[in-house]
Image (cartoon, rainbow, N blue to C red):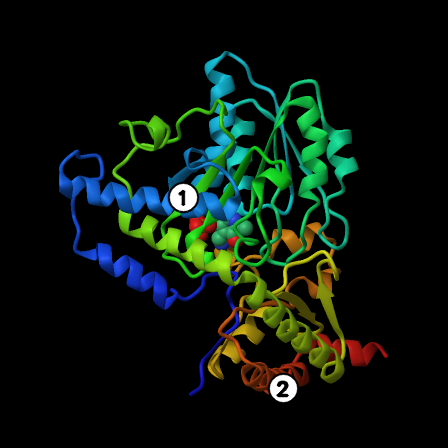
Amino acid sequence: MKRIYLDYNSSTPLDERVIEAMNQYLKKFGNPSNLHSFGREMREGIEVARKKVANFLNCQPEEIFFTSGGTEANNWAVKGLAFKRLSEGKKGHLITTAIEHASVLNAAQFLERLGFAVTYLMPDGKGWISPEKVEESLREDTFLVSIMHSNNEIGTLQPIGEIAQILREREIFFHTDAVASAGKIELNVKELGVDGLTISAHKLHGPKGVGALYLRKGTEIENLIHGGHHELGLRSGTENALGIVGFGKACEISQEEMAKVVPKIRDLRDYLEEEIEKRIPDILFNGHREKRLCNTSSVSFGYIEGEALLMNLDLEGVAVSSGSACSAGEVSHVLKAISLPPEFLNSTVRFSLGRENTKEEIDYTLSVLERVVKRLREISPLRREEKWKR
Ligand code: PMP
């Protein structure tokens, strides 16, 4: 059976060139902290990768801190800033949004339990957060704002640059989770004007279990992981050298090829949406129509369960998500926050495309989708109730 992968926002396949770069380090084993040649060759791999990640984000290598992934980097940004205040005997207020990834939302909720005040901004119906809303929510004691660069479920891009301007004047630390954006849109921390930014390797054809937090030089942040001197003494633990080498290569490739790859992915995604609209009635597209990622399409199919659709598509070889990979099985907090009508809340699937997808794959997906949706609607009690009412 054909297998078609349309879930690139969950994870991406390793690029062959990344595998090759990692292969060169697979048999090296020195501890990068050692001064001998075994250690030095590992250190070299890590530092070359750090430069590549820094280039990718347009910052200095010393502003890149490697972590175990996006989840850790988000936790560190949010808690690290708050713990710094705690260590100075202060608490305070932070602002985030109701549509963040769980690693930001749950970290913020944890800080609430420690006595911090948190504002969770609600987006509009398209998942967009207005800079005015951010400005209105600021307090005298606001020390941190964390707003995602783009949403992984519906693809909406946030006005990060505008929000940064508002916060810069007030010297409030601004962190953005750019995990979903990396590789799909340019991320230039200087142009964006952010103080902290998270990315994760496995979303851009790199390995799992490695990510990075950009921290503007001079940031005062508490450690999340205490220990030795690694990562300028801020994130301890012997580095995941192999993963870091792969991450660096993935960033380099993405930087070189993004301009070529993005239009191709966007065309395919737009074709998928146009055809869905033509062939299948009673659907809704979620998220902003223009300000959005090139690869993401969140679609609600009236009268059917998203999970049933997902599983039926999977049986025919097509892999999609019903929400984000991290919250499979639960009603999406993002779809709730954009006030999707209740009858559509459980009827949504996310198609997220990548550079390996072809038009043939999309055509195959469309034909399966059309057939499966029709069949599920025929047996849908919701559909029968609706007909009954008419
Ligand atoms: N933020 C967003 C927007 C994500 O989509 C993800 C991954 N699902 C993460 C953070 C967490 O990244 P990681 O998988 O590297 O922990």
Q: Position of residue 369 (x, y in %)?
A: 61, 82
Q: Which residue is identified by label 1?
A: 51
Q: Residue at 38% x, 52% y: name it.
A: 247
In the displayed orientation, state which residue is furthest to the right.
390
Q: Is residue 158 above or below residue 379?
A: above
Q: Residues within 10 Å of mark 2 (few under 14, many from 20)?
A: few
Q: Nearer the viewer, residue 144 or 44?
A: 44
Q: CA gap, disc 1 to disc 2?
A: 52 Å
Q: Is the CB of the residue bearing disc 1 within 8 angstroms of ligand 1?
A: no
Q: The residue under label 1 is which amino acid type?
A: Lys
Q: Position of residue 384 (x, y in %)?
A: 73, 80
Give the numbered dot on residue 361.
none
Q: Give left or right: position of 204 versus 151.
A: left
Q: Earlier in the sequence, mark 1 or mark 2?
A: 1
Residue 17 percent coordinates (x, y): 35, 64
The image quadrant of residue 292 is: bottom right
Up/down of 125 relative to 237, above or below = below
Depicted 297 relative to depicted 117: above or below:
below
Q: Is mark 2 within 8 Å of ligand 1?
A: no
Residue in view at x 39 percent, y 58 percent: 206
In the rendered image, residue 237, in percent from the top left (x then y), is placed at 28, 35
Q: Which residue lies under the disc numbered 2? A: 375
Locate the C terminus and report the quarter of the image it occupies. Answer: bottom right
